[in-house]
Amino acid sequence: MPCWDGDTTRLAILSDIHANLPALDVVLADIGRLACDRIYHAGDLIGIGPYPAEVVDLARDTGLRCVQGNHDQLLTTGIPLAPTPNMDDGELMHQHWTHSRLHLAHRDFIRAFPYLRRETIDGVDLTVVHFALTAAGNSFKRVSPGGSDEEILRSFDETPGTLVCFGHLHSRQFNRQFAGRHFLSAGGVGCSHDSTAAYAVLDLHGGAFEVELRKVKYERGALLKRYDELEVPARESIRKAFFGVTGTA
């Protein structure tokens, strides 16, 4: 971490918690030790994980500054009545299950998230967004997650800010300059194949900033078993795709 003279603002930048309570717990404990001034979440608080209500409660109690992700957005736009080309039957059932676990206060909390947060902090023009927004600002561009770094970053041409923090791609990390701006994505908190939760710490001072990418280990045995205990729809495909395991191993 930098040793600047004078006041420094320290931010924690999280994304893609995806209803993973054990991962969020260890990240918040790590953030507490680092004495961060604010915590931002770049979208997808819910979906995939088996703890949607618990994660929403913790995010609200901790004061996370959240933006809409594509999973959060379904509380506003509504879940399709039938699978779409981008949502198979298993995901459709899973999304309905997730929403069934949320009370009205949880839903209102998520629906109030903006799509983008833009703030000037210590002279730094900061934007937090889940992913590249369309010109209308209320939906996300579709870009292949396997595309080149340049292809992905070019999609943000309609997203403002000189330091753009985003999520959505889970395992891919970005911490680089592109087209005169800096792009930061630390990877997801809630979905990894190696029992780690990734996030970033930003130190801002006098118009400059420094980034630390962090990963913290967490125990995921209870998480994986929770899918079976609650009979979460699509649990086998979720555990394989997002955690790299079959069953509760």
Image (cartoon, grey):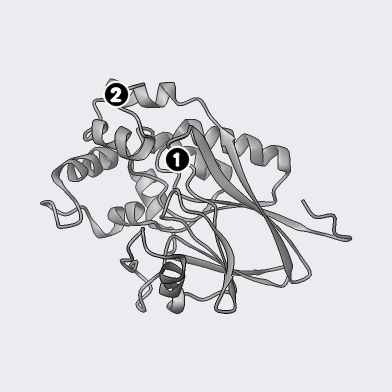
Q: Which mark is residue 40?
A: none
Number of marks? 2
Question: Pointer 1: what residue?
Answer: 190
Q: Nearer the viewer, residue 219 or 80?
A: 219
Residue drawn at point x = 57 percent, y = 47 percent: 199
Mark 1 and mark 2 lie on one chain; the one further toward the N terminus is 1
Q: The residue tagged with tag 1: helix, strand or loop?
A: loop
Q: Is residue 6 above or below residue 17?
A: below
* Residue 18, position as x, y percentages in the image: 40, 43
* Residue 142, position as x, y percentages in the image: 31, 66
Q: The residue tagged with tag 2: helix, strand or loop?
A: loop
> Residue 137's quadrant in the figure?
bottom left
Q: Amino acid at mark 2?
A: Gly
Q: Kindly report which numbered mark, 1 or 2, lies closer to the viewer in this rendering.
A: 2
Q: Which mark is residue 247?
A: 2
> Residue 134's quadrant in the figure?
bottom left
Residue drawn at point x = 23 percent, y = 55 percent: 78
Q: Is residue 42 above or below residue 198?
A: below
* Residue 208, position as x, y percentages in the image: 74, 68
The residue carrying pointer 1 sits among few (fewer than 14), some (14 to 19) or many (20 or more) residues within 10 Å by Cα, namely: many
